[in-house]
Image: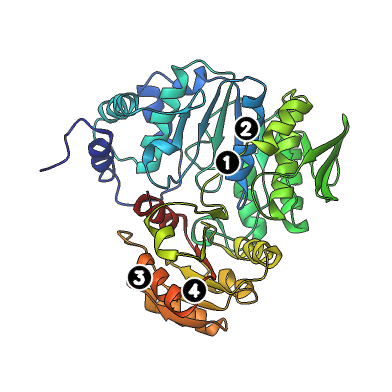
Amino acid sequence: MGIPTNTSDAILARMMALHPKIIDLTLDRMWRLLEALGNPQENLPPVVHFAGTNGKGSTQAMVRAGLEGRGDKVHAYTSPHLARFHERIRLAGELIDEAHLATVLDECWESNDKQNITYFEITTCAAILAFSRTAAEFTLLEVGLGGRLDATNVIGAPELTVITPVSKDHEQFLGETVAEIAAEKAGILKRGVPCIVGPQSDEAMEVIEQTAARVGAPLIACGQHWHVCEERGRLVFQDECGLLDLPLPALAGDHQIQNAGVALAALRHLGADEVACEAAMRNVSWPARMQRLKEGPMVDAAGDAELWLDGGHNAAAGEALSNVIAKLPSRPTHLVCGMLNTKDISGYLTPLERVADTLTAVSIPDEPNTLPAEETSRAAQKAGFETYEGTDVLDAINAIVARSPGSRILICGSLYLAGAVLRENA
């Protein structure tokens, strides 16, 4: 039996066929469709626009937790989704329901009239349409890829922009150097709109500062206008408004301290008080970011082993993940890894070899751009790992448990793999 033609899944499947490329960076198709929809981007609650290579999703989640902690209704747009498309669109604090999603998708489909447009572009239009029709205090938009030509970059006057740390990723689309990639991220800057800037390399910061000067965007930069650190198990943040002494963020890892700093700087600019800032730390939740899985069939298969999940996939994410593992209680650690063929697998795996005992390579199920398990295994061997191959994640878990019961198992390498795990483990 086929999928009913009026469901969100059916409409999304039709949308996949509208453009031959998954990624084709330009804003022309967005402007055309938004015009046909009545320019809903002009009727959004105040927008905070997030770009960056690493941390933008976690940072956005902290900002949302803080704003909601003071009672605000908040729209949020993120990508990619993990288990269901509905995760991408949060309306006034709640995931969009099926009826509403199908309605806005169908409107975008009809207004587009089968013209050339990418899946991400048309679904971003659907999110914007939904946001424009629902009351809220803020709209949080996360860039999909880059910034300058990303489909989300259609807001003429956001309330605030945010650039989290920039590093190498998606070089085939954004440029071969950190400077070139930073220039694409800085494309979200708007005249007169302040930008919170997370910690950056000198190369990236120079480009961001040059772009800000050219367009007239004030910067609120880490190390210049605000500082953050961990002291005695607490998070200490300081800016021109004073000092905050807060609990550490609920998300694991030293890198989340820096993400928290970016989020707190944004919240302070938006007028959040200390209660809201504390809520940002305590209440934040972001799946597949060093997430401990506590129940489900995969957890059952793991037995006494710890089961963790992380969707980081570039060199900076590998380094951050290595640092997190190094601080956990000592325990044999085994990776189950699947990656896309567009990623720098060597850069990702090299820092992880320091903290993991073995790596079991898997292919990402139902993903045409997966790196085959045997190629992941070869790359891991070059990085110094003892390697195995699994037919799927559950097979890998069973084999690890047989070899090393009571160990730590970390499933990692791609958000697409993480999504498949969350669906299978539900």
Disc 4 from disc 3: Cα separation: 15 Å
> Decide: marks 2, 3 in contact (CB < 8 A)?
no
Comparing labels 1 and 4, the label whose residue is closer to the camera: 4
Disc 2 from disc 1: Cα separation: 8 Å
* Circle nearer the N terminus (2, 1): 2
Residue type at numbered disc 4 = Pro
Disc 2 from disc 3: Cα separation: 37 Å
Residue type at numbered disc 1 = Ser
Residue type at numbered disc 3 = Asp
Query: In the drawing, what numbered circle is on residue 65?
Result: 2
- Name the residue that disc number 1 marks: 285
Question: Residue 255, image x and y in percent?
Answer: 70, 54
The 10 Å Cα crowd at callout 4, few under 14, some 14 to 19, many 20 or more, is: some
Residue 45 lies left or right of residue 13; in this view the side is: right
* Circle nearer the N terminus (4, 3): 3
Q: Residue at x 33, y 59 (%)?
A: 367
Residue type at numbered disc 2 = Ala
Q: Secondary structure at mark 2?
A: helix
Name the residue at the front extreme: 304
- Name the residue that disc number 4 marks: 405
Residue 415 lies left or right of residue 243; in this view the side is: left
Comparing labels 4 and 2, the label whose residue is closer to the camera: 4
* Circle nearer the N terminus (2, 3): 2
The 10 Å Cα crowd at callout 1, few under 14, some 14 to 19, many 20 or more, is: some
> Decide: marks 2, 1 in contact (CB < 8 A)?
yes
* Circle nearer the N terminus (1, 4): 1
Q: Residue at x 52, y 20 (%)?
A: 44
Question: Residue 402, image x and y in percent?
Answer: 42, 77
